[in-house]
Image (cartoon, rainbow, N blue to C red):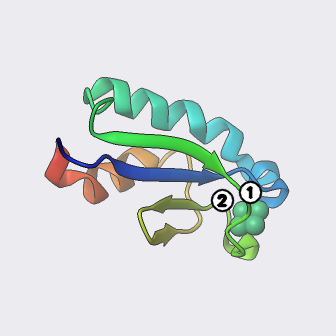
Amino acid sequence: MLNKRNIAICMGSSCFSRGNNELISEIQKFIRMHSLEDKVSFRGDHCFSNCSEGPNLRIEELIIPNIKKETIADILKKELSDLL
Ligand code: FES
């Protein structure tokens, strides 16, 4: 059994106020569309200490800053390309 890829979205107050709340549904949609439920683990997490560049997403150890609703699907496609 493969380990799931860990994806975390920052739910700290700064990223939250910069729109991370909206991005959750976009990420969940991407996971469903690509049937990744068994391959990724998606959760919210505490502040990544990178607030000024938020909203932030983390895939394993990689922090991806400034994520937006318009770009999140492309980011996930690129970072999860080996799972698609
Ligand atoms: S609140 Fe997201 S990095 Fe601090």
Q: Which label belongs to residue 80? A: none
Mark 2 vs mark 1, CA separation in Å:
4 Å
- Secondary element at tag 1: helix
Residues packed near mark 2 inside 10 Å, few (<14), some (14 to 19) or many (20 plus): many
Against 33, residue 57 (above or below) is: below
Residue 56 occupies quadrant: bottom right
Residues packed near mark 1 inside 10 Å, few (<14), some (14 to 19) or many (20 plus): many
Q: Residue 52: x percent and y percent?
A: 75, 75
Q: Which residue is mark 2?
A: 55
Q: Quadrant of the N terminus?
A: top left
Q: Residue 30: x percent and y percent?
A: 38, 33
Contact flag, marks 2 and 1 (Cβ < 8 Å): yes
Residue at 51%, 70% in the rendered image = 63
| 79 on left or right of 15 | left
Residue at 63%, 45% in the rendered image = 44
- The residue lying toward the viewer, choosing from 75 and 80, is 80
Q: Earlier along the polypeptide chain: callout 2 or callout 1?
A: 1
Q: Does mark 2 have its CB less than 8 Å from ligand 1? A: yes
Q: Which label belongs to residue 15? A: 1
Ligand 1 shows up in which quadrant of the image? Answer: bottom right
Q: Residue 60: x percent and y percent?
A: 41, 63
Q: Amino acid at mark 1?
A: Cys
Residue at 50%, 67% in the rendered image = 64
Total number of numbered discs in the rendering = 2
Q: Quadrant of the C terminus?
A: top left
| 83 on left or right of 64 | left
Against 11, residue 53 (above or below) is: below
Against 31, residue 70 (above or below) is: below
Q: Does mark 1 have its CB less than 8 Å from ligand 1? A: yes
Residue at 67%, 47% in the rendered image = 20
- The residue lying toward the viewer, choosing from 3 and 20, is 3
Q: Amino acid at mark 2?
A: Pro
